[in-house]
Image (tube, rainbow, N blue to C red):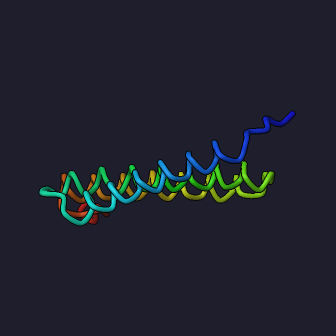
Amino acid sequence: MSIELPMPVLYIALGFLSASFLLCLYRLIIGPTTFDRALALDVTSFVAMAAIAVFSMQMHSLNYFPVILIFALMGFFGVVAIAKFLLRGDIIDRNR
């Protein structure tokens, strides 16, 4: 069972996703604090996953979903590592 969306809807979705990607990229570069930059990096990974999903719908292919899963895992572990670094100053605890 597949849902057929008209092509203009997919193009509009890609347009909004690209606009939000550019805004997140701006916040990533200009962000006043490191927490703003970490949040922008997390949102950028989610926007990239959504763009890959829309592209997958446009191509009528399910082959891109493992790529989305890899992006999700990398985004999650990246944000956890950044948060741990910002809170403790080190990612790996060696003094246990």
Q: Residue 72: x, y in percent?
A: 53, 51
Count of numbered marks: 0
- Is 11 left or right of 81, judged from the image as shown? right
- Quadrant in the rendering for residue 77: bottom left
Residue 41's place in the image compared with 4, above or below, is below
Please identify the residue farthest to the front as the structure is shown. Answer: 8
Q: Residue 91: x, y in percent?
A: 29, 62
Q: Residue 17: x, y in percent?
A: 48, 51
Q: Residue at x 33, y 61 (%)?
A: 25
Q: Quadrant of the N terminus?
A: top right
Residue 4's place in the image compared with 83, above or below, is above
Q: Residue at x 65, y 59 (%)?
A: 67
Q: Residue 19: x, y in percent?
A: 41, 54
Quick one: 83 or 17, which is closer to the camera?
Answer: 17
- Quadrant in the rendering for residue 66: bottom right
Quick one: 18 or 81, which is closer to the camera?
Answer: 18
Q: Quadrant of the C terminus?
A: bottom left
Please identify the residue farthest to the left as the structure is shown. Answer: 32
- Is 64 left or right of 46, judged from the image as shown? right
- Is 78 left or right of 11, judged from the image as shown? left
- Quadrant in the rendering for residue 32: bottom left
Q: Residue at x 79, y 35 (%)?
A: 3
